Image (cartoon, grey):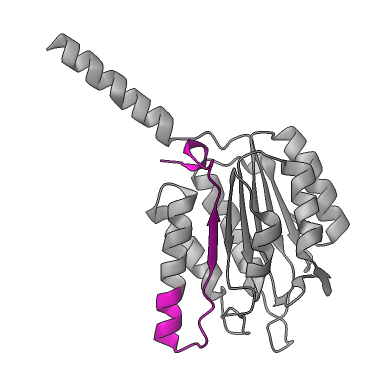
Amino acid sequence: MRRFLFCFGFLLSLTVSVHAADFSKWAVLIVSGDNHAHSGNPSAVFDNARHDLVTAFTRIGFSAANIAQFAVSPDPVAQHSGNTAIANTLWDLSGRAPDGCLIYFTSHGTPDGIVIDQRVLEPEKLGMIVGNACGSKPSVIVMSACYSGQFVRTLRGDNRVVLTAARPDRTSFGCGEMDHYTFFDDCFLRALPMVGDFPSLGGLVQQCVAEREQQMKATPPSEPQLDIGPKVGAAFRWK
């Protein structure tokens, strides 16, 4: 009996250690790239997500001290969104928090990239920024925008989870003046407490978005993309 209890205790501790990663030394970058609805009228839809993502990520173990925020609208807790500032901040942050990278962009998208304060950040440019700062570290990269599937090719990696709000040739939904979140950001925030790892989160977000679009009769479907590298493992789990 003692041997059984010892073995059970050992296996339990092993299970806990495998399934609970330490995110406290991960670099976290959250970017709101625009402050307008698709109509051109002012909207806080992207900033709403940015603000609540900070809270959601700290709840699962990421350190508030290692989270950098960017926004277009003035905000005392955020820097102004711009490609150079984003690149420099991620580089500095990844040096201070070297264990991994969590990157989340939410904005409008174009067939050429994602909008950052009326300019377009192309996939190749973002791929260089992330590669320089994060390299082969465990990384989760979320691109919430129309046509954001175009970023998968340049952001994917063996030790990365890449999740986008749409296929390369599709729009996403929910960026009107009356929307609090985009469909994708809403699904991401709803799904996060329901799972314990980022690959599972990506699958649940895909399912949520598909169901939401069916209910709202939004067509054609955005079809969020999920790319999971072959080396993704325990470092991406929080429970």
Question: Which of the 4 quarters of the picture holds residue 159?
Answer: top right
- Does residue 65 show up magenta in the picture? no
Q: Find the residue positioned furthest to the left.
A: 1
Residue at screen point 81% across, 59% down = 125
Say left or right for 94 vs 201: right
Q: Which is nearer the eye, 186 or 52?
A: 186
Residue at screen point 80% across, 52% down = 128
Vertical order, 230 against 121 (above or below): above
Location of residue 107 in the rendering, given as x and y in whole percent from the top left corner: 69, 71
Please identify the quadrant where the N terminus is shown. Answer: top left
Residue at screen point 85% across, 47% down = 88
Question: Which of the 4 quarters of the picture holds residue 11?
Answer: top left
- Tally of marks: 0
Span of residues in magenta: 210-239
Location of residue 196 in the rendering, given as x and y in whole percent from the top left corner: 41, 47
Please identify the quadrant where the C terminus is shown. Answer: top left
Say left or right for 53 vs 11: right
